[in-house]
C-alpha cells in the first residue's frame, strides 16, 4: 500500500468526494469534457470582452451627489459655464496676430463650433481676447466644452485631438485640459497594461520554472492566469453596460488575476505532486488536492472578494467599479484553480513532472525535511518568540511612522511624464498665460438673480447669450427664495466682498464686478460666461497664487467658503471642492468599510480554523503590515526619500486621497490569501497531533516557499505597473509590491511563528483538539525526516 512519511496513505485521510469532484474530475473522460467546456467559455469570454477599453470611463473620482458635482452640473446646464473640457494651444512663429495665423485661428474656431458634440467654444479668435494670448504673442488658446456624459466627452475630445492637433497651416496645435488629461492617462495606462502583459507572462513562466523545475508544471499557472484575465475582462464588459467602470480597473484586474492564479496554482500543484510522489493515482491525487488545498483556495478567494467588496460602501464610481471588478477577479481566479486546473492535473498525471531540469537538486532537497531552511527558521523563532516579536513590531512601527505626515490631495496633469505632449501643453498654459481660472472655486446661488452693471454687458461676449438661453421657468423650480433685483444685487455685492476678504482668496468675480480684498475692480475671466440669469447667479473665487487647490490648502479654502454666511443656499464647486467632497466621502464611509472587511475576515477565518485567536491575530498583523506599507508610500511618493536613487518623481508632493483606499483593500485580501495558505498546513499538522511549535514549523516549511514565490511573482507583476509612465499606476504597483513582500517576510516568516508560539494552546480555543488521524504519530524514520512531536516543546 502506498505510504507517506512511513504511514499508510489511506489511513492518513479519506477525503469525501465533493459534487465538484464527482461531476468535473472524477474520471479522465470527465476531466477532458471539463477542459473542452472551459476552453469554449474562455473563447466566448475573449470575444465578449473585445473592445472593453472603449467602454471604460476615465473619471469617477467624485461622488455623483456631492455638492461640488451639483455645482459644476448647475453651471454647465444653466449658464453654459465652467472649465472647458479641451484647450487647444495654437502657436505661430510669426505671432498669432499675423493675417495668416489669424485666418487659420478663425477657421479652427469655426470648425470646433460646427462639431455636433460641442456645447460651446471660447477662444482668442475672433474677438482677440487678451487673456487667451500668450505673453510673448506667439501662442493663443481656444477652449471647447462638449455635451454628454464622461464617455461621450472623452470620445469627442479624442476625435478633435486626432483631427486638429499637429500642423494646421501657420499654426502648430497641441491640446491640454481635463479631457486631454484623461485621454492621455488612458493611453499611458493601456500602454502600461500591454507592457505588463508582455513582461508578466515570460517572467511568471521563468519564476514558475525555477519553483517547479518542470516546464509542464510551470506552464499551468500561466494558463490559469490567462483564463482568469480573459473571463474577468468579459465580466468588466458586462458591468460597463449597467454602471460606470473606471479605466484603471483593467490594469488592476490584469495584474491581480495573474497574481491570484499563480497563488492558487502554486498551492494546488505542489500538493498534487506530493500526492503523486506518495503513490496516489492522478484522479485520487486530484481529489485529495481539492479536499485540502482546494478548500484553502475557496476560503482565500472568498476573503479576497469580501475585502475588495468593502469598496462598495464608498459612493465613488471609481471605487465601486474596482470593488466589483476585483471581486470578479477573485471569483474567476478561483474558478480557474478549482475547475480548470484539476482537469489539467488529472489528464497530465505523472507527466506533470516532465522536463524537470532541477530533478536532481529537488531530490537532494527532500532528503531531510527537518533541515529545511524555513523549518530551521521557524524553530529558531519559536525558541525566542518574545524578542523576535518585539523586534519585528518595532521595525514595522518605524516603517509606518512617515504615514503620520501624509498630506492628502488629488492629482492633476502634473502626474504625466515630461515627455507627454499634453504635459508640455499644460505647462505652457500655466507659464505663458494669465489664466489661473482652473484653480478657481465656483459658488452657485440658485434662485438669486442679480442686475449686471452696464459695463458687464459687453464682457459676456464669450458666453454667447447663455443667460438668455436659460428657461425663465427655471427660476420657479430652483431652490432658494428669489429677491427683487435691487435687493438681490446688494446681497450678492455684500457676499462677494465678504468672500474676497477670506484668507487665501485673491479675488471674486460676479455679475456686478470683480472684488479684491473687499473692493470692486473690473476684468472678466477668460472663460467667463453670463454670471446671472433666471436660474440664479454664481461667483468665481480665485485663490491666492500660493494656494494649491488639490492639496490640504484647497480643502481649507473650500471649508471657509462653505462656512461663510450666504444670502441663499450656496453650492461650492471647483477642484478644491471636489477634493473636499471626495475626502469627506471616503472618511465618512471608512469605518463601515473597515468594519465590513474585518467582520468578513474574522467570520471566514473562524469557520476555517474554529479558533477565535487566530483570526484576530491575522487581522491585527495585516493592519500592521498595511500601516508599514502606507508609511513607505508616503516616504517615497510624498517626501521623496528615494529621489536620490530614482530621480524626482512626476506629480505633486501629496498622497492621492483615493488610491490608498483601493490599494489597501487589495493588499488586505492578498495578505489573507497568504495567511490561509500557511494556516491550512499548520492546521493539518496540529490535527494530526503535533504540538503548536512543531505544527507551525512544519506548516512554514511546507508553504513558505510557495507564498514567498507567489509574493515574488505578484511583486514582479506589480513592478510592471510601477514601470509605467503614470504616477498613479506607479503608486499602485509599488505599494502592492511592498505590501506583499513585507507580508511574506516580516509577518508570515517571523511574527506569525513568534505570536503563535507565545499563544500556545490558546491558538486553538474554543475548538476541541481534533483526534489525530494516525494514532501512531509522525514517524521519525519517514522520508521527510520530520522529528516526532515529543522532540520539540510547545503547547
Image (tube, helix red, strand yellow):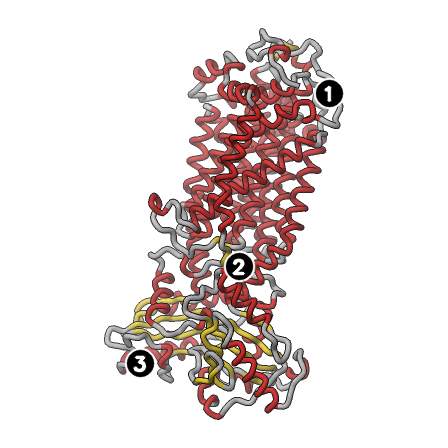
Q: Is residue 35 visible?
A: no
Categorize mark 1 by other alpha carbons within 10 Å: few (<14), some (14-19), many (20+). Answer: few
| Residue 714 locus on image (x, y percent) | 49, 37
Residue on which the image places disc 2: 57
Q: Residue at x 49, y 81 (%)?
A: 518
The vertical placement of 43 against 438, above or below, is above
Q: Secondary structure at mark 3?
A: helix
Categorize mark 3 by other alpha carbons within 10 Å: few (<14), some (14-19), many (20+). Answer: many
The vertical placement of 16 against 493, above or below, is above
Question: Which tag, 1 or 3, sits closer to the chain's start?
Answer: 3
| Residue 247 locus on image (x, y percent) | 51, 55
Categorize mark 2 by other alpha carbons within 10 Å: few (<14), some (14-19), many (20+). Answer: many
Residue on which the image places disc 1: 770
When asked about the image quadrant of residue 474, the answer is bottom right
Rounded to the nearest angstrom, the CA distance separating label 2 from label 3 is 36 Å
Q: Nearer the viewer, residue 766 or 721?
A: 766
64 sits left or right of 195 in the view: right
465 sits left or right of 96 in the view: right
Amino acid at each position: 500500500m502506498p505510504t507517506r512519511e512511513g504511514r499508510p496513505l489511506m489511513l492518513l485521510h479519506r477525503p469525501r468526494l465533493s459534487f465538484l469532484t464527482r461531476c468535473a474530475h472524477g474520471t479522465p473522460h470527465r476531466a477532458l469534457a471539463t477542459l473542452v467546456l472551459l476552453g469554449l467559455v474562455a473563447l466566448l469570454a475573449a470575444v465578449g470582452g473585445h473592445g472593453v477599453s472603449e467602454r471604460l470611463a476615465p473619471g469617477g473620482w467624485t461622488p455623483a451627489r456631492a455638492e461640488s458635482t451639483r455645482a459644476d452640473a448647475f453651471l454647465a446646464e444653466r449658464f453654459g459655464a465652467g472649465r472647458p473640457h479641451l484647450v487647444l494651444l495654437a502657436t505661430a512663429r510669426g505671432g498669432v496676430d499675423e493675417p495668416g495665423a489669424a485666418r487659420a485661428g478663425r477657421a479652427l474656431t469655426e470648425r470646433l463650433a460646427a462639431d455636433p458634440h460641442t456645447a460651446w467654444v471660447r477662444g482668442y479668435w475672433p474677438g482677440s481676447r487678451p487673456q487667451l494670448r500668450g505673453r510673448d504673442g506667439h501662442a493663443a488658446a481656444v477652449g471647447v466644452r462638449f455635451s454628454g456624459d464622461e464617455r461621450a466627452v472623452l470620445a469627442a475630445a479624442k476625435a478633435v485631438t486626432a483631427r486638429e492637433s499637429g500642423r494646421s497651416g501657420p499654426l502648430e496645435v497641441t491640446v491640454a485640459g481635463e479631457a486631454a488629461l484623461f485621454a492621455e492617462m488612458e493611453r499611458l495606462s493601456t500602454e502600461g497594461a500591454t507592457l505588463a502583459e508582455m513582461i508578466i507572462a515570460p517572467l511568471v513562466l521563468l519564476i514558475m520554472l525555477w519553483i517547479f523545475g518542470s516546464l509542464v508544471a510551470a506552464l499551468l499557472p500561466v494558463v490559469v492566469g490567462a483564463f482568469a484575465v480573459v473571463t474577468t475582462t468579459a465580466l468588466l464588459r458586462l458591468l460597463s453596460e449597467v454602471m460606470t467602470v473606471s479605466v484603471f480597473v483593467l490594469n488592476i484586474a490584469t495584474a491581480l488575476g495573474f497574481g491570484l492564479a499563480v497563488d492558487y496554482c502554486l498551492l494546488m500543484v505542489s500538493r498534487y505532486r506530493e500526492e503523486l510522489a506518495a503513490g496516489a493515482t492522478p484522479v485520487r491525487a486530484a481529489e485529495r488536492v481539492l479536499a485540502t488545498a482546494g478548500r484553502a483556495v475557496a476560503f482565500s478567494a472568498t476573503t479576497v472578494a469580501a475585502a475588495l467588496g468593502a469598496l462598495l460602501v464608498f459612493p465613488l464610481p471609481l471605487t465601486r467599479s474596482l470593488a466589483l471588478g476585483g471581486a470578479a477577479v477573485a471569483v474567476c481566479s478561483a474558478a480557474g484553480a478549482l475547475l480548470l486546473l484539476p482537469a489539467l492535473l488529472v489528464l497530465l498525471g505523472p507527466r506533470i513532472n516532465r522536463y524537470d531540469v532541477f530533478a536532481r537538486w529537488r531530490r537532494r532537497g527532500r532528503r531531510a525535511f527537518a533541515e529545511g531552511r524555513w523549518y530551521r527558521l521557524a524553530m529558531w523563532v519559536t525558541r525566542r518568540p518574545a524578542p523576535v516579536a518585539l523586534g519585528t513590531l518595532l521595525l514595522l512601527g518605524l516603517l509606518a511612522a512617515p504615514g503620520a505626515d501624509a498630506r492628502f490631495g488629488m492629482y492633476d496633469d502634473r502626474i504625466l511624464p515630461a515627455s507627454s505632449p499634453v504635459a508640455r501643453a499644460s505647462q505652457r498654459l500655466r507659464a505663458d498665460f494669465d489664466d489661473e481660472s482652473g484653480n478657481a472655486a465656483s459658488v452657485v446661488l440658485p434662485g438669486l438673480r442679480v442686475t449686471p452693471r452696464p459695463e458687464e454687458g459687453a464682457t459676456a461676449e464669450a458666453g454667447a447669450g447663455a443667460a438668455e438661453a436659460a428657461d425663465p421657468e427655471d427660476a420657479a423650480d430652483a431652490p432658494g427664495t428669489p429677491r427683487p433685483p435691487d435687493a438681490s444685487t446688494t446681497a450678492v455685492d455684500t457676499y462677494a466682498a465678504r468672500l474676497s476678504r477670506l484668507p487665501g482668496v485673491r479675488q471674486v468675480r460676479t455679475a456686478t464686478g470683480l472684488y479684491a480684498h473687499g473692493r470692486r475692480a473690473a476684468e472678466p475671466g477668460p472663460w467667463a460666461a453670463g454670471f446671472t440669469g433666471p436660474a440664479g447667479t454664481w461667483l468665481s473665487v480665485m485663490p491666492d497664487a500660493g494656494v494649491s487647490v488639490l492639496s490640504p490648502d484647497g480643502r481649507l479654502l473650500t471649508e471657509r467658503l462653505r462656512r461663510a454666511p450666504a444670502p441663499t443656499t450656496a453650492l461650492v464647486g471647483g477642484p478644491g471642492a471636489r477634493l473636499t467632497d471626495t475626502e469627506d466621502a471616503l472618511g465618512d464611509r471608512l469605518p463601515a468599510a473597515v468594519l465590513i472587511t474585518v467582520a468578513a475576515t474574522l467570520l471566514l477565518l473562524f469557520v476555517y480554523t474554529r479558533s477565535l485567536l487566530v483570526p484576530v491575530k491575522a487581522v491585527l498583523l495585516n493592519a500592521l503590515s498595511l500601516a508599514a506599507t502606507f508609511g513607505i508610500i508616503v516616504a517615497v511618493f510624498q517626501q521623496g526619500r528615494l529621489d536620490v536613487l530614482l530621480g524626482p518623481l512626476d506629480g505633486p508632493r501629496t498622497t492621492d486621497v483615493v488610491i490608498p483606499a483601493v490599494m489597501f483593500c487589495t493588499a488586505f485580501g492578498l495578505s489573507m490569501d497568504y495567511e490561509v495558505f500557511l494556516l491550512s498546513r499548520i492546521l493539518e499538522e496540529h490535527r494530526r497531533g503535533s504540538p503548536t511549535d512543531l505544527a507551525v514549523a512544519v506548516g512554514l516549511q511546507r508553504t513558505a516557499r510557495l507564498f514567498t514565490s507567489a509574493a515574488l511573482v505578484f511583486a514582479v507583476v506589480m513592478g510592471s505597473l510601477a514601470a509605467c509612465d503614470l504616477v498613479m499606476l506607479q503608486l499602485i504597483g509599488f505599494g502592492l509590491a511592498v505590501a506583499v513582500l513585507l507580508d511574506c517576510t516580516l509577518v508570515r516568516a517571523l511574527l506569525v511563528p513568534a505570536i503563535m508560539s507565545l499563544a500556545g494552546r490558546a491558538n486553538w480555543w474554543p475548538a476541541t483538539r481534533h483526534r489525530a488521524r494516525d494514532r501512531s504519530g509522525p514517524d521519525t524514520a519517514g522520508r521527510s525526516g520530520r522529528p516526532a512531536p515529543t522532540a520539540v516543546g510547545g503547547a
